[in-house]
Image (cartoon, rainbow, N blue to C red):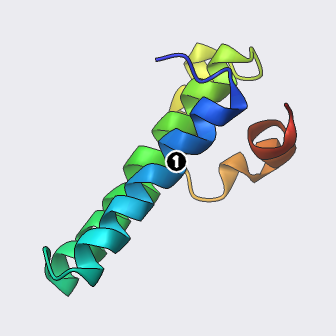
Amino acid sequence: MKTKNILVYYGLIFIPLGVLAFCTKNHLISPIVFVIGLQIYAFLYHPYVSGLRLLALNKLERKDFWRMFIPFWDTKFFKTLFLDF
């Protein structure tokens, strides 16, 4: 998965949230499933995708990829992740 392109990265991080919101709004999933989905997104999916982007941009070494799963560790890469085009 190539996340070097900022638009691809934004799509990968925002589309799952939109799907969760859509499914909840239309009563396709229960509120409990929504909360579980948000937790999976916040603690597993988003750090994984952000880590892939940092690896693609050579801002993170492969051996430090696991650190992306430490809460708030990726804030030092905020500008690189969200603002560098």
Q: Amino acid at mark 1?
A: Ile
Residue matched to label 1: 13
Could you say which quadrant of the image residue 84 lies in? Answer: top right
Q: Is residue 47 visible?
A: no
* Label 1 neighbour load within 10 Å: few <14, some 14-19, many 20+: some
Q: Is 81 left, or right, of 7 in this rendering?
A: right
- Local SS, label 1: helix
Please report the residue visible at 29 percent of the width from the left and 82 percent of the height from the top.
Answer: 25
User: Foreground residue, 27 or 1?
Assistant: 27
User: Foreground residue, 27 or 50?
Assistant: 27
Please report the residue visible at 39 percent of the width from the left and 53 percent of the height from the top.
Answer: 16
> Furthest residue to the front?
26
Q: Is residue 43 visible?
A: yes
Residue 12 location, x and y as percent?
A: 49, 40
Could you say which quadrant of the image residue 34 lies in? Answer: bottom left
Relative height, residue 75 to residue 24 (above, below) = above
